[in-house]
Amino acid sequence: MTKFVRRIPPTVIALGIVSLLTDLSSEMIYPLLPIFLASSLGAGAMALGLIEGIAESTAALLKVASGIWTDRTQRRKPLAVAGYALSGMMRPLIGLATAWPAVLALRFADRIGKGLRTSPRDALIADVTDPALRGTAYGFHRAMDHAGAVLGPLVAAVLLNQVGLRMRQVFLFSAIPAVAVLAVLLLGVKESHAPRAVPAQSPKRLAPWFELGADYRRLLLAALVFTLGNSTDAFLLLRLNETGVAAAGIAVLWAAHHVVKMVASWFGGRLSDRLGPRAMILAGWVYYAAIYFAFGWVSSAPWLIAIFLAYGIYFGLVEPAERAWVAGLAPPNLRGSAFGWYHCAIGLAALPASIVFGVLWKQWGAAVAFTAGAAFAVLGAILLPPARREPAVVPEAAARVD
């Protein structure tokens, strides 16, 4: 493992630390949010679906805008810094909310920050990484992200059970790691100044669809269809809570789930470089369908806990491979736009996915909702484009950075 880490560019390592700290902050809140909404603010599954769907769709629209902008300016870092700063300021204020619409507004602002930072960050990772190691680089970044998600719920559980804080106070404490994020960004992240292979697109054009290619557009369609069944993970936590798992227990399970995601992402990224991204995504989406189907029909708490932990493997199979495939399909000068539209397709589908899932759950129960999610995953897998060899490109990892 040490050998592979040494081959990862310093900027990718710094961005991994940023993601670790960001998720440490956000995951002190996220696993407790469904319970907080239900017990303190009187909101149910439909309100939860509305909050998460609107929040993620907001991020999606801004991801494509920030992706296009970062290609036009050929700068990645400024938007990333602005996005992380905004999220870090807004997220802890959920602890002051007295009604669920206030949570909606704060999640909306938090996701604006996510929308600003995600596409420039993912493009920057591709800019500074050798193409042969992209899966490894994205796997490392996702593993660090999940490591923060391991620590966040554990910190929340300690604050709840050992220190005796209330959920609102835990939310406010999440501001501490958010402050450290900015220091790492400003000091450790360097942009690549390698010349782009093709001049940047004209400012008069909104989206370079034809330059991105038919395979890229088909991958986007498949991802959108899959995401229509990929509702917020908050519903899985709500399902666990319904079977008798308490708030502190859910926080610990959420941490354990991210341990699985962290390990799976590291090995999945390396495996993606060997097997190719399509094979990994196909396996991951079929695996997801099986997990969701089981989660809908199993009612035993111990079995649901086991399935929930196994669910973490899906992220390792898919997340690094998806990003590596997007980076490989896009010309260097359009990587920001490619990641923007990719994240946009996923995020926009999150709104109907979460709302419909909440409606299905309320009207016909969890089994129907989870089965629908599994069906969309299978359909998305069928729509994946064929695997093709990526054209040779000049590695940008050795480019001058400042």
Image (tube, helix red, strand yellow):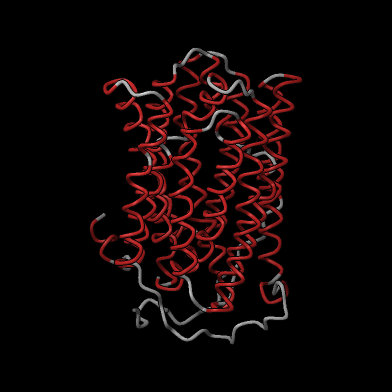
Question: What's the residue at 60%, 52% (across, down)?
Answer: 59
Q: Is 97 rendered above or below residue 9?
A: above
What is the total number of numbered labels drawn onto the structure image?
0
Query: Quick check: 251 left or right of 83?
Result: left
Q: Quadrant of the C terminus?
A: bottom left
Quarter holding residue 81? bottom left
Question: What's the residue at 56%, 49% (across, down)?
Answer: 111
Question: What's the residue at 57%, 75% (across, down)?
Answer: 71
Query: Quick check: 103 left or right of 132?
Result: right
Q: Is 112 rendered above or below residue 365?
A: below
Q: Is 1 rendered above or below residue 252?
A: below
Question: What's the residue at 42%, 38% (across, down)?
Answer: 27
Q: Quadrant of the N terminus?
A: bottom left
> From where the camera sits, is residue 338 visible?
yes
> Which x, y percent locates residue 157?
34, 26
From the viewer's side, name the closer residue of 376 and 169.
Answer: 169
Query: Quick check: 39 left or right of 194?
Result: right
Q: Residue furthest left?
A: 2
Q: Is 380 rendered above or below residue 50?
A: below
> Which x, y percent locates residue 241?
51, 18
> From where the camera sits, is residue 267 visible?
no
Query: Quick check: 382 left or right of 233?
Result: right
> Which x, y percent locates residue 329?
59, 69
Q: Residue furthest right?
A: 363
> Which x, y percent locates residue 236?
55, 28
